[in-house]
Image (tube, rainbow, N blue to C red):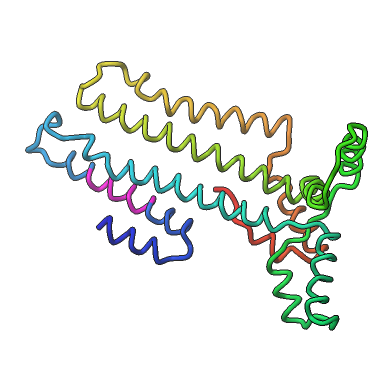
Amino acid sequence: YILLLFIVFLWTKQRSASMDLFCHVFWYVGIVFVSKEWDDTGKAMSSINWFKLAIPFYLAINFKAGSLSEKVRDLSRVQDKLVSPERMVFLTQQKVDANAGEDLSQEQLEELHSQYVVCKPNDLSVAATLAVLDANEEEMTDDDMEAIRVQSSREYEHLHDQIQRLQGSVVQVLIYGNVLISLVAARIEERITVTWWIVFIPLWVYAGLNFLHSCFSCFFIVGPGADSGEFEEDEDEEGVGENAAGSPEAD
């Protein structure tokens, strides 16, 4: 059954969606297994191998982490496509020169724009960075200048915030999820004798960190996704909303 799922996963292009699907499937499988064991009145609770019974939950957690990792990769790909308007003009001119000086056809322009996402650099931030570099007498290449422009844009910051948030979620899901299931299984099998308050420490920490982050975001800062509508609207004005707005959102 697991091998069949992996075959389906390898053949599909929507890896993130597939991993989300497998995550839900294994959660339900785990619940069915646990319910079946609990309803078996002829079997003593101490005779159940809870670590073996927890395997579907381990798989669900790791598939969830894999889904989040795939979303990080998708966002990173979009981030790598970001170019400044100046670089886009340069790339378009390169295509024109390679086309013997003739104007590009509509299909060629669409192909070019599908490979890149034009962002809107923050002119003040770019000027401040250049002033610091000039003061330090540091030399810059065209690629360095392009990196400064792109990284100053709100599109880059938006994607960077999402990537960091998802990477943090991957670590939390793997650490807290696997540790919690292991502690619960060990406590039920009486391999450890600590109280259930201690067993649920990973859950307390996970929920507490997310609660504090939510409170901090509400009262002190604007969350990374709070201005997503404005972000997409600005991209549409620049003619690139179709490319960037399709980037995957965090769960």
> What stretch of residues is rendered in magenta?
23-33
Q: Tell which residue pokes out farthest to the top in this image.
A: 194
Q: Tell which residue pokes out farthest to the left in this image.
A: 42
Dominant SS type (magenta): helix
Can residue 123 be found in the magenta stretch? no
| Image-quadrant location for residue 11 | bottom left
117 lies above or below 98: above
| Quadrant location, the N terminus | bottom left
Can residue 28 be found in the magenta stretch? yes
91 lies above or below 33: below
Q: Is residue 63 left or right of residue 193?
A: right
Q: Is residue 69 left or right of residue 78?
A: left
Image coordinates for residue 145, horizontal then vertical, percent: 83, 49
Q: Is residue 167 left or right of residue 136?
A: left
Image coordinates for residue 88, horizontal then vertical, percent: 81, 64
Image coordinates for residue 98, horizontal then vertical, percent: 78, 77
Return the residue nearer the eye: 250 or 70: 70
Q: Residue at 78% across / 74% down in the picture?
A: 95
Q: Is residue 122 left or right of residue 31?
A: right
Q: Residue at 40% across / 56% down in the picture?
A: 21
